[in-house]
């Protein structure tokens, strides 16, 4: 009497118990769980009649809309594998991913059809389905999504099949920075347990109204696509990150929960409307994707009243492996001290397995907040491997442990705190400088809105830190003043030697800073020291 662990079963439960509850709000459209379930089932029938079978791969390039949510269930309950695509990628990267993933079909929003039109003739697809957002027909050689659903036989029912919890549910591609994108193989079991972590540690409940600010293609919305449905809570769709709209939705839809990278948090606290409104629901917001500065967490809590929850993980781990557990004793600390604690990645979640920080020889670092090591993990949520890439898989998973590439310390209470990505660590004259530590200091400066700290070549020291800063509107501060500010708060050798002011910083679709693009402008092919 053992049932396979699959998040798909939560749709069945939601339809059974919450059939008339609002499941999805997407602009002017609303769907109950009964209606959502019917549309997802009809998609499954249409896909099956189009030849999609268990184990087949279906690529999807959609923003955070009800169509995307339908695809997660309609594709996967056939036993097929969903391949969520980053719609911000260049055509050549999309061509590689679609062909490398062996996708038989592509479901694409017409807004993002341009890159697909460029490469359509090079794709090994059997069919394209387009989601129309206007009355104008797509120039792609495919069928309209609604027409595709309507064409499904009314008499057809979902094929009966057995789901193996260890079979693939999704194939999620990481962004290629120095090499081709890698296909991360995530199973039904891994997604189920990650979503269980999402539910438990973010406190998801039936009355939550969840805003999808995080791209659903990114690690399956961190698991929110499954856990919100499991609780019978309400999904509120968001086509793109628009701070004024998000702040308006906080009020009009009474949002109680959302997720986003620190750059999204920064966009919200710096929007002019942020200081004009009072958000009565005091939403919980989970942040991850890059180490958030304590000063940024403090602003989010003070200006917007958000209850910040820091989580950590990678696409390869479904993604959660750490969260910053909040203890009652922390309430006695000052607001600044609380924000500093919340900037830590924290401890293992209940259902993911074991995570620790180790030296290169595998020994765990001392719990002293000083010894630096690499975060490694093993357990329920780690990927099966990289699709069709055993060599890279073997390099990432050694002796049963997945090596994250993130450098961290472990504090006396067991809380892990990232100091830097291995590739972002600055080694100046033999001394290690954490770029995130310097960024954390700079975020305390009132004139700094966004900042990235990178290593640049230096004849004497090998490399030194450079701060690339986006200033607040109307700010007037000099390079010397920024450097002096840092030196007043940290060891002088850690302070930036160079400061550049820019209009914007390069980011991924999920809001992560793309430091590699900044470094490339300075190293010009020269091999970085570390």
Image (spheres, helix red, strand yellow):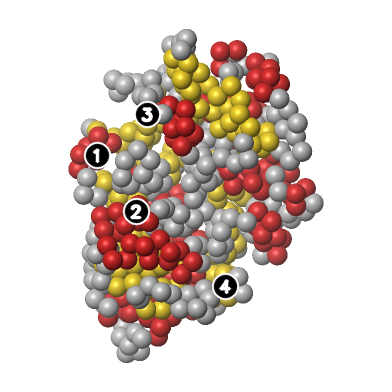
Q: Residues within 10 Å of mark 1 (few under 14, many from 20)?
A: few
Q: Earlier along the polypeptide chain: callout 2 or callout 3?
A: 2
Q: Which label number is shown at residue 92?
A: 2
Disc nearest the viewer among 2 and 4: 2
Along the line of sight, which residue is nearer the eye, 438 or 253? 438
Q: Is residue 117 visible?
A: yes
Cα distance between the residues tagged 1 and 4: 44 Å
Q: Which label number is shown at residue 525?
A: 3
5 sits to left or right of 34: left
476 sits to left or right of 267: right
Name the residue carrying label 1.
Answer: 392
Indicate the position of residue 125 as horizontal and vertical percent values: 27, 67
Q: Is residue 19 visible?
A: no
Name the residue carrying label 4.
Answer: 22
Q: Earlier along the polypeptide chain: callout 2 or callout 4?
A: 4
Indicate the position of residue 144 as horizontal and vertical percent values: 41, 78
Picture residue at 58% right of the left edge, 43% below the top: 263
Cα distance between the residues tagged 1 and 2: 21 Å
């Amino acid at each position: 009497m053992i049932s396979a662990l699959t998040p798909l079963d939560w749709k069945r439960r939601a339809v059974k118990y919450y059939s008339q509850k609002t499941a999805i709000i997407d602009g002017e459209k609303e769907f109950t769980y009964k209606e959502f379930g019917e549309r997802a089932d009809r998609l499954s029938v249409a896909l099956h009649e189009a030849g999609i079978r268990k184990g087949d791969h279906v690529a999807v390039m959609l923003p955070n809309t009800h169509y995307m949510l339908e695809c997660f269930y309609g594709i996967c309950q056939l036993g097929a594998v969903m391949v969520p695509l980053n719609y911000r990628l260049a055509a050549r990267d999309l061509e590689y991913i679609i062909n490398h993933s062996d996708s038989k079909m592509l479901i694409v929003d017409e807004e993002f059809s341009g890159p697909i039109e460029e490469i359509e003739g090079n794709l090994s697809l059997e069919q394209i389905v387009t989601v129309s957002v206007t009355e104008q027909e797509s120039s792609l050689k495919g069928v309209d999504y609604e027409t595709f659903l309507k064409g499904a036989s009314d008499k057809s029912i979902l094929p009966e099949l057995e789901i193996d919890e260890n079979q693939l549910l999704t194939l999620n591609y990481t962004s290629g920075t120095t090499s081709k994108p890698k296909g991360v193989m995530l199973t039904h079991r891994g997604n189920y347990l990650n979503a269980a972590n999402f539910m438990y540690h973010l406190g998801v409940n039936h009355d939550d109204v969840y805003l999808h600010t995080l791209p659903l293609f990114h690690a399956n919305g961190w698991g929110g696509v499954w856990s919100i449905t499991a609780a019978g809570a309400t999904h509120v769709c968001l086509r793109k990150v628009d701070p004024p709209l998000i702040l308006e939705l906080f009020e009009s839809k009474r949002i109680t929960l959302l997720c986003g990278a620190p750059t999204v948090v920064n966009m919200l606290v710096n929007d002019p409307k942020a200081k004009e409104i009072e958000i009565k629901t005091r939403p919980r917001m989970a942040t991850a994707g890059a180490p958030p500065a304590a000063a940024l967490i403090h602003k989010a809590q003070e200006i917007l009243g958000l209850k910040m929850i820091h989580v950590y993980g990678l696409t390869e781990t479904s993604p959660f492996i750490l969260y910053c557990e909040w203890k009652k004793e922390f309430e006695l600390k000052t607001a600044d001290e609380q924000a500093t604690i919340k900037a830590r990645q924290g401890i293992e979640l209940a259902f993911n397995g074991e995570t620790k920080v180790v030296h290169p020889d595998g020994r765990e670092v001392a719990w002293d907040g000083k010894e630096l090591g690499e975060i490694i993990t093993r357990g329920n949520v780690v990927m099966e491997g990289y699709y069709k890439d055993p060599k890279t898989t073997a390099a990432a998973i050694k002796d049963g442990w997945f090596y994250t590439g993130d450098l961290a310390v472990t504090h006396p209470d067991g809380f892990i705190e990232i100091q830097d990505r291995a590739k972002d660590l600055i080694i100046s004259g033999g001394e290690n400088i954490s770029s995130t530590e310097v960024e954390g200091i700079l975020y305390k400066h009132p004139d700094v809105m966004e900042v990235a700290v990178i290593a640049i070549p230096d004849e004497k020291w090998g490399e030194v830190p450079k701060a690339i800063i986006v200033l607040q509107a109307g700010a007037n501060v000099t390079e010397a003043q920024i450097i002096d500010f840092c030196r007043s708060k940290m060891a002088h050798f850690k302070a930036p030697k160079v400061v550049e002011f820019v209009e914007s910083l390069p980011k991924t679709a999920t809001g992560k800073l793309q430091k590699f693009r900044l470094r490339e402008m300075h190293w010009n092919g020269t091999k970085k020291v570390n």
